[in-house]
Amino acid sequence: VKGLLISATLIGTAIAANPSLIPWPSRIALGQDRLVIDSGFSVVVDAQDPRLALAVTRFVARLSRQTGIPIQEAFGPISGRVSLTIHCAAPASGYPKLGDDESYQLEVSAAGATLTAPISTGVLRGLETLAQLVEAGPDGFFLPGVTIDDKPRFPWRGLMLDVSRHWMPVPVVERNLDAMAAVKMNVFHWHLSDDQGFRVESKRFPKLQQLGSDGHFYTQAEIRQVIDYARDRGIRVIPEFDIPGHATSWLVGYPQLGSAPGPYQIERNWGIFKPTLDPTRETTYTFLEAFLAEMTALFPDPYFHIGGDEIDETQWKASGRIQAFAKKHGFKTSPDLHSYFNRRIQAILKKHGKIMIGWDEILHDGIEPSAVIQSWRGKDSLAEAAKKGYRGILSSGYYLDHLNTAAFHYQNDPGEDPGGHILGGEACMWTEYVDTETVDSRIWPRAAAVAERLWSPADVRDIAAFHGRLIPVSRSLDWVGVQHRSNYAPMLDRIAGNSEEAAIRTVADAVEPFGIDIRQAARHYSSSTPLNRLVDAARPESESIAELEQLARAGQKPGQNNDQLRATFTLWTLGPEFISQDNYLLAEVASVARDLAEVGAIGLQILDQMKSGNAATENWIIEKKQLLDKLEQPRAEVRLAAVRPVRDLLDGMSRSPGLAVSH
Amino acid sequence: VKGLLISATLIGTAIAANPSLIPWPSRIALGQDRLVIDSGFSVVVDAQDPRLALAVTRFVARLSRQTGIPIQEAFGPISGRVSLTIHCAAPASGYPKLGDDESYQLEVSAAGATLTAPISTGVLRGLETLAQLVEAGPDGFFLPGVTIDDKPRFPWRGLMLDVSRHWMPVPVVERNLDAMAAVKMNVFHWHLSDDQGFRVESKRFPKLQQLGSDGHFYTQAEIRQVIDYARDRGIRVIPEFDIPGHATSWLVGYPQLGSAPGPYQIERNWGIFKPTLDPTRETTYTFLEAFLAEMTALFPDPYFHIGGDEIDETQWKASGRIQAFAKKHGFKTSPDLHSYFNRRIQAILKKHGKIMIGWDEILHDGIEPSAVIQSWRGKDSLAEAAKKGYRGILSSGYYLDHLNTAAFHYQNDPGEDPGGHILGGEACMWTEYVDTETVDSRIWPRAAAVAERLWSPADVRDIAAFHGRLIPVSRSLDWVGVQHRSNYAPMLDRIAGNSEEAAIRTVADAVEPFGIDIRQAARHYSSSTPLNRLVDAARPESESIAELEQLARAGQKPGQNNDQLRATFTLWTLGPEFISQDNYLLAEVASVARDLAEVGAIGLQILDQMKSGNAATENWIIEKKQLLDKLEQPRAEVRLAAVRPVRDLLDGMSRSPGLAVSH
């Protein structure tokens, strides 16, 4: 294969933007020729694993969807041209395992593509690379010539989804598994119980789901269906039952497990709550022993998550009986008691062949060294766990519900780990402020930054190059099934009512939602609060504002044509005229539209000033900056991202020699 | 209930726009108060039909989706407030019948809503009305106070879907059944076989689907699933097996049925083709007798469609044996032979308890009067059929694949019919130029015009009022499940590649696709031609251009602020700068963008002229009009709808006394 071999360290922006692969492979060399994709695309699979046939069928269906070309699936020995040949020496184990070989080699040339992997998991990863390689060219769709030799940096690359705060039915889970597979994530961490809902059918203790879920739970058949679905995509499923805190929903049906008498109600609010399992009663362990016997049989993965975060000690402190127990056993603090509970649970899990995982609060002396620590409060706990000999996974810095930028997550590295204690990391989607309609746009595309951080070599860290690849990958994820882009219009439609869609969209494109901190401070939210407002429809990072920022930075040169910026700023100034306020969803949009109109007016003033050729005074610039700072303050739980390109223009004015500041 | 009783004849634009109901009810009176919708919304059903529980569950789920409020379903005797009470004297028949009573009465006030119907079909219709009544107000969502007494004008209100030219899997059918139900359509006409594919599993003659479908067919279990799905929504399912023409796909597996020897291949092109069943051999009827015995048992509806359109007589004329048969029986023309075939088929269907329907070519002497004629070639055939005593349904003027406007279909009335021969009509979606991705946007929202024409009183015909209601109803259909709006962004994403999404969207918003006539003339299409270009993504009627037209008409007054038009025209002029041409999808967009830039430039010149306060010369106006006419010519199979608002400005200029034309 012709072409230049590029090691990961040499990737520049220009090359990285094309092809648009996420995660970027360990080694990649671009060739000069192309493999044309047409309706005769054919595949030969030289392998034993029947799951590969399913994977190839999915790949071909996606190719059809992505190119619009109806491609007949073609398997087995074929006369004539073979587009893609797959070699795989051995099938994967029935269910994916931590540390499975995920490597693959891919060669594409005009003559055809060859995908080779030691086990079928690598084929799955390579097919996703192939799908991302598809490009439209002057004569139609094609795969660029390329040689790839790829394998992951970390073996644990996960997404945690909270299905307790807001219920997420099976189709939501499945479409997100498809998106995970597209960026080569391999662990689905399923947060199945919390104060607000117990989401799994227990046949042994049916009141868990009957009284603890409002009827929104997965049957065991559905759990098995999701596990199979994930397995087919090379994704492990780790269940989490969060104990002993975050356990209100358990206590509605089984109040005798609580540290206080009850009765208990399903929690409808967000926060940390008092109901906690009683760690001192043997009956608690009898119950958990039977419950975990059932659940460890349901979930095949050897790792089992017990939560263990945010224990509120109120009930423990208030109970004379619990305090007497603690004293008798020499437990001085609530964490000591928590540690006792964890050791008991670890023993039960061990009996059922499972390895315990927990949030970093479980890290106490006495926990057996097999335990895995999931670090969420800070990276230090990951290092601390490793020092003590525990394995760990990083989630601090990967909380998607904080609505940080993709770049923020991208720069958050688990660190080098010669001892092999750092298994990888997990992006976490807590769902207080998302529902089935908005969850996709809060996970995607930003989780792809975590996916690349955990798969690609540590020295793949050029943010501009990553952004260049992220836009096309984000677009393609909608064809995989998640609705982070396609759901935007229907949500804006609902807000628009009888108003003009374009005006509403102009505002929504110009703002970005704030995350959990600002939202919980802004108003009282509960599980029945509709999540249908501007803040919910707007996307965490506005692509159109990012484009305007590029224009603004380019537009600082004197003599530059700034008509696009001028037209956009003009539309911003006109928004309020076209937005009625006759409903509560629109009233809020109208208020943001008024602020946006101010930003637009400032932008037009700056463009006029630039066009005049006269230098602006320092005071004039300072005044504008102060106005922009004020307009950037949170309102309606959104940030006016529109401020950024206008400030870019202003910054350019201060710097530009042609527009030197005079007094 | 307070409020003014409005008969259908008195509806004005202002009232019709609010509430946004399609179809508009027979009688409606608006009240003054409102029924608030919150998470405690509850329903009591006083009826026996178990299907009503399913319908209410769907209604509540839709209410949740539409309002973002998680509503718990509440059935049966409830303490406390009841939001909606449903009275229904009798269940519907198991399977919906032509002429079923679909009437219902609805009362909404602050105290609650009451829905009453003689049979449960009316409840289904009333629930759709309720869902359309939902509005967002200053304090949240509500149902406006209203009294409605409603029933349909015609008993047959259908949608025909061709699943042969492009395969439409079950989910596509089901989401369109949901949308049909939302606008009270009650017949799903399933065009199941044609030259390009035979789409039903036959157990008796399995080579039909095995060799005639490329593997894309419905199993009998899937057929039953769709029938049940439709039945639950009060929709009848009419199968169509198109014979004796349009029958190539039958002959691939069973060439002995053909009028010429064969062998036959599945047809990959569009048009009228020669392969035709042999009407002269008894073995043809033996086959059809057995086949129809199987299919009439599978489909419960008493009406059965045999197609019968567009017979190409080449094979018949070329066969000495067929000609000898015709001569022996005294058949002078191919239509005589066709008529003989139809009489034989009618007899077979009658034996199985079915009533024959066919396209208007079947209208010949000798067909029994029970037959129903579907008029597609012109309204005359409907009148002619009625005169001869046949019942008929209108499809001429309701062909959605022609991409006419909603207004065009809305004005196409089946006519008054004192004799009861006109049963109603059907919108027809032929799928040469649509696939699973684009079919929804070619059916919706325009089919809603047909739905209203066939349900509402004949004197409900104010187009402006209809358009005012159509926009919100179109928006709400996406929440029902069809993807005519949500699919727009993903399709534009694919075209955009690495280009700026906003620039692509600007072009797509400014154009409208042409229908079958222009497309088939523009280039060669076959079943493997990708339908992923600008013409496929663009929507039949651009809402944003309609908004600009309103602005342009309002903006003709001197002194009017035309900043929005100016900003939009400016963006049009800038498009080409931001659209790369590095792929074949974009190259086409770029060429349209250059024309759009010209339209924008003319628009800016007109605005400058208007702003100057000087009158334009007649020549100047004529020159601009000629330029616009040229720019409106078809290119890339789309129409530059953007021309319309610019022409509106120009027309206003000629008329405006303040801008009188001077020479």
Image (tube, coloured by chain):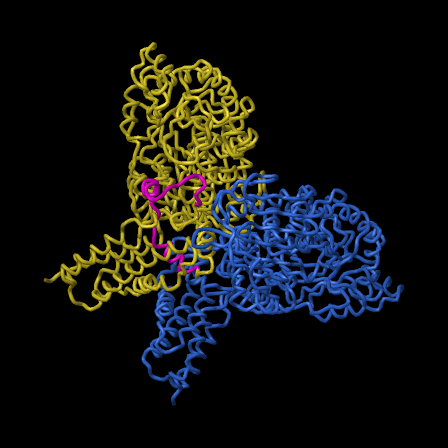
Chain colours: A blue, B yellow
| Quarter placement of the N terminus of chain A | bottom right
Is residue A311 something one can see in this rendering? Answer: no
Rendering coords of residue A152 (x, y %): 67, 60
Rendering coords of residue A259 (x, y %): 78, 58
Is residue B335 something one can see in this rendering? Answer: yes
Q: Nearer the viewer, residue A588 or B427?
A: B427
Looking at the rendering, the stretch of residues picked out in magenta corresponds to B501-530
Against A611, is B167 above or below?
Answer: above
Q: Nearer the viewer, residue A23 or B619?
A: A23
Judged from this view, the residue extending furthest toward the right is: A328
Q: Nearer the viewer, residue A597 or B596?
A: B596
Q: Nearer the viewer, residue B153 or B442?
A: B442
Q: Quadrant of residue B551?
A: bottom left
Rendering coords of residue B646 (x, y %): 26, 57
Indicate yes or no whether the magenta region holds residue B516. Answer: yes
Judged from this view, the residue extending furthest toward the left is: B663
Identified at 46% across, 50% down, the residue is B486
Judged from this view, the residue extending furthest toward the front is: A2
Against B312, is B563 above or below?
Answer: below
| Quarter placement of the C terminus of chain A | bottom left
Q: How many marks?
A: 0
Judged from this view, the residue extending furthest toward the bottom is: A663
Rendering coords of residue A143 (x, y %): 52, 53
Horizontally, residue A137 falls left or right of residue A247, namely left
Horizontally, residue A164 falls left or right of residue A21, namely right
Against B38, is B91 above or below?
Answer: above
Indicate yes or no whether the magenta region holds residue B548. Answer: no
